[in-house]
Image (spheres, coloured by chain):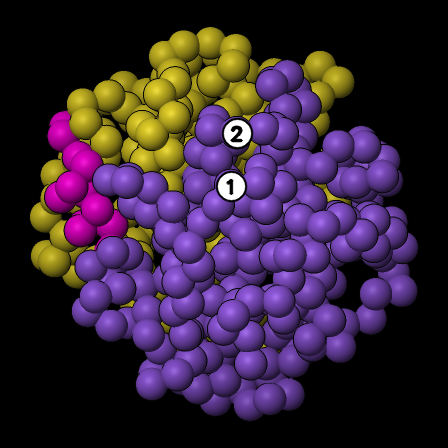
Chain colours: A purple, B yellow
Amino acid sequence: MQLYGYWRSSASYRVRIALHIKDIDFDYRAVHLVKDGGEQKSAAYAKLNPAQLVPTLVDGDLVLNQSLAIIEYLDSLAGPLLVPQDPKQAAIVRMLAHDMASDLQPITNLRVLQYVTGTLDAGDAGRQAWIAHWVARAFAAFEVRLKQYSGRYCVGDNVTLADICLVPQVYNAKRFDVDFTPYPTLMQVYENLQALEAFQKAAPERQADAV
Amino acid sequence: MQLYGYWRSSASYRVRIALHIKDIDFDYRAVHLVKDGGEQKSAAYAKLNPAQLVPTLVDGDLVLNQSLAIIEYLDSLAGPLLVPQDPKQAAIVRMLAHDMASDLQPITNLRVLQYVTGTLDAGDAGRQAWIAHWVARAFAAFEVRLKQYSGRYCVGDNVTLADICLVPQVYNAKRFDVDFTPYPTLMQVYENLQALEAFQKAAPERQADAV
C-alpha cells in the first residue's frame, strides 16, 4: 500500500495511526501542502485525487481518499477492529469520530484557514479567534459525551476510530494555544492514547517530511 | 424512533431520506435553527445533544447525533443496504459520501455562514463568494469521481449513502445560484435520484416545519 499524506494533516495522521495499530506495512509518500503553492495541486496528484486533498491510499487498483472511508476499509483487512461489530457500539464510535472529523476538522484545516486569513483578510488574530471558536464548541460537547462513554479511551477501554479522530485534533489545538482546562476527561483520554506505540509512530514529528 | 431535525439542514435531510428508503416509521421533532436565536441552543435540546446541532435520533435509550453514524446504524436494522457489504465497494461509497458530508457540508452550513457574515463581517457578497468557492471545488472533484463510479446513481445502479449525501448539497447549492453547467454527470445522477419517492418525501419543502 502507498499512503500519500502530509505530516501535519489531521486526516493523514488518522490513517497512519490505523495502519500502525493494524501493523500493515505501507510506503509513505509525502505531499507537501505548502511548498510551491501546494504539491497537492500538481497535475500528477490531482489525477490520483481530484479533490487535491490528502490523504490518498493506493491498494493495488483501489484508490481511496477520505480518511474515515480508508480506515473502515482497513478494518475489513486486519484486526484489531476500530469500529466494533455491535451496531449500537459502532454507532457511538462513529458518532464520536464524526464529532471531530466532520464538525471540527473540516472547518479548521489549512485550506479554510488560508481563505479566512487571505481572501477574507482576517489576519493572524482573526485566524486565532476562528480556531478558538470552533475548537471550544467541539471540545466542550466532546467532554460531555466522554463523561458518558469513556473508559481508558473514548468508548470504554478499547481503542476505536473515535480515538484516532481525537488525537490529531488535540495536536492541532496545541499548536494554537487552546486552553485545555475545561476538558479534563478529553485530556486524560488523550494522554492515555499518547502512551500507545501506534500513536507515537504516527505522530507528525516522526514522519520523514516533518520540518 | 424520534428524529430531531430542521427542514433545511442537510444532515437532517440525509437521515430523512434513509428512514424513508428503509420505510422506518419515525416522529419528526422540528428544531428551528434560526427562530429565537436557535432552538438547538435551548437547555432541553443541549441536554439531548451537547453539540447543539441537528439531527439527533432517539431509539429507546440510544441517543445518536451525526447523520452518517445514524444512517450506518439504520443499515443494521432494515434493508435495503445503503453501504454495500463488499469492503471495496463500501469504501468507494463511504469515500463519495464524505466528499460531500465532510469536505463540503461542514464548511457551508448555517453556523459557519453566520460566523463569516457576522463575526468576519463579509456581508452577503462575501457569503456568496464563500459558498461558490467551496461548492465549485467539491463538485468539480465529485464530477470526476462520478465519471469513474456512477451508473444510474453515484456508485452503479443501486442507491447508496453517497446519493443520500449528494442530494442535500445540490439542494443547498441551488439556493445560492450555483452554475451547474460544469457538472453534467452530477446533475444527471441528481435528477435520477429526485425521481425516487423516498427522496421526494424527505425534501425540505415537504416537512412540517418548512417555511
Horizontal side of residue B186 vs A153, given as left or right: left
Contact, mark 1 vs mark 2 (Cβ under 8 Å) = yes
Looking at the image, which residue is at 47% across and 27% down? A76
| Circle 2 chain | A
Looking at the image, which residue is at 73% across and 71% down? A174
The residue wearing badge 1 is: A24
Q: Secondary structure at mark 2?
A: loop
Frontmost residue, A120 versus A145:
A145
In the image, the segment drawn in magenta is B141-152
**Where is residue B19 drawn, in percent x and y?**
45, 19
The number of numbered discs placed on residues in the rendered structure image is 2
**Where is residue B101 drawn, in percent x and y?**
43, 46
Q: What amino acid does circle 2 point to?
A: Ala
Can the viewer see residue B15?
no
Looking at the image, which residue is at 56% across and 67% down? A207
**Where is residue B44 drawn, in percent x and y?**
78, 38
Few, some or many C-alpha atoms within 10 Å of disc 2 (few <14, some 14-19, many ≥20)? few
Horizontal side of residue A35 vs A113, given as left or right: left
Prevailing secondary structure class for the magenta stretch in the rendered image: helix
Looking at the image, which residue is at 31% across and 28% down? B89
Frontmost residue, A18 versus B110:
A18
Few, some or many C-alpha atoms within 10 Å of disc 1 (few <14, some 14-19, many ≥20)? some
Horizontal side of residue B35 vs B145, given as left or right: right
**Where is residue A39 drawn, in percent x and y?**
33, 74
Tag of residue A78: 2
| Circle 1 chain | A
